[in-house]
Amino acid sequence: MIFDIHAETERLAVLRRGPDSRHKIFLRTVQGQTLGEIPADLLPLEPHWSSDGSTVAFGSNDGLLYIHRLGETGPKVVFANPSLQAGFCEWAADGNRLVFSAYDRVRHTPPSIYCLALDTGHTLQLTNDPKTVDRFPHWSPSGQWVAFQRQFLDEPELPRRVYLVEVQSGRCFPALDVFEGECETARFSWSPDSSSLLVTLSHKGRVELRIIGLQDQSTAWSYESETIQRGAFSPQGDRILCICSDELLWFAYPEGTLLQRLSLASAASVWNYYTGAQIGFDLHATAVYFVGANACLYRWRIGGNCDCILQDTPPVGPAFTHEEYFVPSRDGRPIPVQRFIPSQPRSPAILYVHGGGGVIDPDDPFMLRLLAEGIEFVSAAYRGSSGYGREHEEANRGEYGRADVWDVLAAGFDWKKRAGENRPLILAGYSYGGFLTFLALAQEETPWAGGITLWSGTDTFLHLGLDRHRAFPTDADQYAAAQVERSPLKQAGRIRVPLLIFHGALDTVATTDEMRAIQASVLSQGGECELIIFDDDTHGLMRHRDEIHARVMSFLKQLE
């Protein structure tokens, strides 16, 4: 669940599952009055209200940007560039501009920051450095600045930084000149007068919230705790919300006095989206709204109760037995594993590898449909998954595509011991999980009887640099070796089990040419590989879930 609230009108825009398990944007008031909905056919993503509460802007999985004005028949496209994949849009306070990030899906260059004038349709590119990944832009209230996250492709050892760009001049500079760890920002990180920025700093297990003055980079306020996730200015700027994994803290600013705290034991930890924690405020900052990790929308009346005001619609699933346990990986790290066992399991089972930064989802529609037909699922929270925490992310620096492959393999070998060596285990993964699936299938010794990848990332995923600063070792020799060892294109010829690939021709984290090259490499070495390409679909393959399900069932029957 992803949401935005317009404080003055108490209007909610909520991206959530409908009864058919497809994601729509539901428009309603806090009191429950329905205002409309944006259909799943548009593949909508994160919604944002305009400053006057009359219009919602949102991106699409197709890379388009839309706006929808209340009272009109439906959304209209405001940005459609066939070479750019746009996303993470946000309104300027004037209601006339959107800022967003986009990358070139033809040349596969990293994302940059753009500004769209809605009255003229003119698009201004604010950043244009081919050696950096620029994402997650956030307007200053004045409209003069945009803060964003930057990663450096030519210096992979450098962590994320927060940069600022002046919209009129294009002048770009770091929020902090010197800091050794990660620096992140999010929505609600600007002071109302645009003079200060709240950032999250993390280094070697230490996490700090810090308010930085833009004029001289001075520290106006800071707070340190190992459990900090993010922070936010209140709309009036006289309060700071500190979001921790186990509680919410409400500070006076600039005094720093702790005014209120909420233990999240009564709710759930705040869910972090790419653009930051999913939170919002009412008009006078007397209540905080937030989405919990359990996909519920909560309202904390500061100093009072915290209540769930909206729940996601869970898919209607079959009965199954649920088991949880730990498996030691190759280096001894304990890996959390879950099994979902239907009442009458069939012979083949699937080890399901979720996407990057994700978590094992017991309500995953793909999994529930197959569970209903007797297919057992097992899933490992490989290192880097949500729930591991910052210290585990740091431990995985330089190990992406290697140590997480060990984790997947360990879960597979362990399952074979538990379930019986004669039962076939198929490895399946989506997005970054598909990237890991390619690599885990190509290992010398594996427990797999077959493999399935869905909207998988490949080498383009790494070239875009989305996590390149974390993915590879910094030593030059080790880096060169990793470029080979962690390349699905270079490793595909080692795959010796039947492989089924689903890909959307409009996908931007992998190209159709790459998928064809992987198929050709498998076939050239005597392997089996079927590639199914959907010309009208992109990452997530939301338009073809029924066809995918039918073809997967046929594939599994062949391996029984």
Image (cartoon, rainbow, N blue to C red):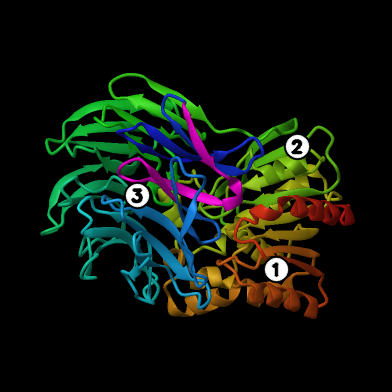
Q: What stretch is highlighted in magenta?
A: 33-57
Image height of 307 relative to 366, above or below: above
> Disc 3 designates what residue?
205
Q: What residue type is labelled 2?
A: Ile
Q: Which of 440 and 33 is in front in this view?
A: 33
Disc 1, SS: loop
Q: Residues within 10 Å of mark 3 (few under 14, many from 20)?
A: some
Q: In which quarter of the image is residue 129?
A: bottom left
For image coordinates 68% across by 35% down, the residue present is: 323
In this rendering, does residue 409 appear at all? no
Q: Position of residue 137 (x, y in %)?
A: 34, 58
Q: Residue 341 carries which label?
A: 2
Q: Does the magenta stretch include residue 198?
A: no
For image coordinates 64% across by 42% down, the residue present is: 364
Q: Which mark is residue 442?
A: 1
Q: Quadrant of residue 182?
A: bottom left
Q: Quadrant of residue 341?
A: top right
Disc 2, SS: strand
| Left or right of residue 229: residue 370 | right
Q: Which amino acid does label 3 sit on?
A: Gly
Disc 3, SS: loop
Image height of 130 relative to 305, above or below: below
